[in-house]
Structures are given as C-alpha cells and as structure tokens.
Image (cartoon, rainbow, N blue to C red):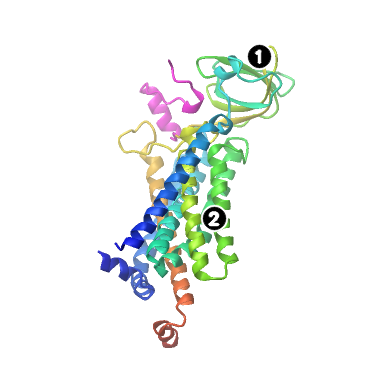
Amino acid sequence: MKPHRQKKLGIILFIALGLSVSVGLILYAMTQNINLFYTPTQVALGEVDVGQRFRIGGMVKEGSLVSADDSLQVRFETTDYVHAVPIQYEGILPDLFREGQGIVAEGTVDVAGVFHASRVLAKHDENYMSQEVKAALDAAGVDTENHPTALVQPES
Amino acid sequence: MWLWFSKLGSPKWFYELSGRWLPWLVIPMALLLIVGIVWALLFVPPDYQQGNTIRIMYIHVPFASISLAFFPLMAVAGTITLVWRMKLADMVAKQAAPLGAWFTALALASGSIWGSDIWGTWWIWDGRLTSMLLQFFLLIGVISLRSALEDTDAAAKACAVLSIVGCINVFVIKFSVDWWNTLHQPAGDFSLSDEAANPPEVWVPLVIMIVAIYLFFAVSLILSTRNEILQRERRAQWVQELVEGH
C-alpha cells in the first residue's frame, strides 16, 4: 500500500474509533434514561417519586390477578421475584396478558406504593414454539416459562 | 490479490461478471422465496402464545437483519472511495442507500403490525425501535446529502464519511436489547444444539426466508449498480457499443 493511502486509512480508522468511544460513553452515561422501564425492585426501594409518570416492567405475579365483575377494572401485582408492586388498571388488556406473563405498564405510583396504570403492554420472550411442542416440553418437565430476562432481577 | 482488487474496481469488468452471476442468484432466490413464504404462511404451526401472528416474524426478521448490513457495506465502500478512489465502490454505495431505506422501512412497518397485535401498541420509544428509526433517518440523510451536492466526487466523499459515522448506530441497534431494558425481545437462540429454546419447525423456514431475502438484497443491489454503471460510464466506448448492439 502506498504511504499516502496508508495515512488516509489511518486517519479514517482513528476518527471512527474516536467517535465510537465517545458515542459509547454518552450512551453509557444515559443508561437510566434509555431504559424503557423501572423494575419492581427499583420502585419498591423508592427510586421513583410519587406522582412522577414512568413505566414499570415485570412479570404478572401468579395468583394476584383480581378483575371486577361489572367493569374493566383489574388489580394485579408485578414482580421481578425479588419485590412485587401492586398495579391498578382500568381498560382493555393485550391478548397476551395473563398471570406469569411479562408486562410493561405506564402510569404513576401513589403514597401507598400502588401503581395506577394508564396503559398496559405485553412483553414476550424470544422463544417460539407450537402448542404441541410446548405441551410435550411441559410434560417432560422442561422449564419453558415466558421469562423475558430483562424483567427478572438476577438472584443475588 | 491486488491485481484482482483493482480489476474488480473496473466498472466494465464488474458489469460483465455480474451479468454472468445474476441467473445463479435469481434462480435460488426465487425458489427459496416461494418455499419460504408457502412454508411460513401455511405450514408453520401456530405459536403457543401468539397463534398465527407469529407468521409476521418470517417477514420481519429477514428484513430487519439485512437492514443492519447497509451501513457496514456503505462504510466499507466509502473507505475504499476515500483511500483508493475506486469509482465502482461509490456506485455501489450510492445505490445501497435508497435500497437500505426501503429495507429499514419494511422492517419497521412489519414490526409495527406485529407489535400492535401482540404488545398492544404499534410504537414505543424503546432502545431497539428508536435506534432503528434513527437508521432510517440516517439513510434518508445520506440520500439527501448526495442529491444536495452536484459535484460527484464531493458527494462521494461526504457520503462516505456519513456512512462510516452511521456505522456506529448499527452496533447500537444490535446490542440495544442487551444493554438496556426494552419492550422488544432480544434475538432468539436458533441454534441446533438447544432444542428447548426454539424447535426446528420454527427456525428452519426462518433460515430459508433469511437466505432468500439476503439473495433478494444481492440481486437488487447488483441490478441497480449495473444501471448506475451504464449511467456514469455512458461516454465510455464499451457502453456505447453495448447500447448500439441491442
């Protein structure tokens, strides 16, 4: 390679590397702003102010879902298997919503620690299979539960 | 190797070679597209959670994954343009930008349709969706930058620099689902060994569709580059002979 081309290539690589490092540092510094939701643990520990609008993400706790008979009102708890936060919501839930499913809810938390959601979204994981395969795996005792990793705190 | 490299840089040589390659790309592409689409739409079993909506994945994943190839491709072409001043590299880069915008738009649109049904929303400003939208705007930016500069050489250099910079966003898109918490799920594990994660009945048609869309991308890019060659080399003797010969 001719020296002047080598020099040019060097400059390009240097600029690309410099930009990547700076963008990487900016993104790292903004992690909390880029994260879509807070975990139930963060909410339970009081990292979010009362009345502030934010999103919470977790699993719908098994056996916690209570729906009203005469309205669309539901109460359930969302958990990351460390802490659970009760959620109150009135409206239409996504088809995928059920106990043990990952959800992301938008709203505010009150003084009592209850989250009042104005919107509930379903979050699913990256494993896809047919009903038959799911039934066969369940029968074989393989754990296939829908646990989006981001929703569950690593056990410490 | 250097001889081969400089030979590939000759538009005439590329035009002739790509003309001979094309049938070998088009035939497998057509076959795989037909097999993949029929398999995905008619024979893939409904998902245990998402039912028939899972079929959108067979369009969304191939388009989304090939969309990530455009900026690295344009950055490599741009570096060749800046360092070796190879004309062909810039022709490829020029034609890749609008193609990339279309592929990115299709990935975003198919993802929106999937999300509106399964998540309960067609759009959310999470790391994955936002960085993908940024890529779409960056590609529009590259296209506008080129059409704004009249001088071909200056446009080539400016677009090359923007493409190299835009490459950083590809890493952000790719790792957004791992670095931050998002509504979008991370990439699936479609390996042979781990049968529990995703069974072959799910991923084999997906792999077929991915290969088919990659071939579609290659064919589209080669066809539009050939047009670009004829356009830019219109004063060259071989192009005039080619045009008169027909």
Q: Position of residue B122 (x, y in %)?
A: 62, 41
Q: Can you identify the residue that label 1 sits on?
A: A113
- Magenta stretch? A127-156
Task: Name the image quarter holding residue A94.
Answer: top right
Q: Position of residue B29 (x, y in %)?
A: 39, 60
As displayed, is residue A41 above or below residue B42? above
Left or right: where does residue A68 sit relative to residue B183? right
Q: Nearer the viewer, residue A15 or B161?
A: A15
Secondary structure type for disc 2: helix
Q: Which mark is residue B192?
A: none
Identify the chain of the residue marked 1, using the numbered disc in the image: A
Work out whether residue B175 can be spotted: yes
The stretch drawn in magenta includes residue A147: yes
Cα separation, mark 1 vs mark 2, equals 45 Å
Residue farthest along the right direction in this orientation: A70
Query: Residue at the spot x=35%, y=23% of the render?
Result: A140
Left or right: where does residue B77 sit relative to residue B119? left
Main SS class of the magenta portion in the image:
loop
Task: Name the image quarter holding residue B147.
Answer: bottom right
The amino acid type of the residue labelled 1 equals Gly
Query: Residue at the spot x=74%, y=22% of the render?
Result: A71
Which quarter of the rendered picture does the C terminus of chain B lie within? bottom left
Secondary structure type for disc 1: loop
Query: Residue at the spot x=38%, y=28% of the render?
Result: A136
Q: Residues within 10 Å of mark 2 (few under 14, many from 20)?
A: many
The amino acid type of the residue labelled 2 equals Leu
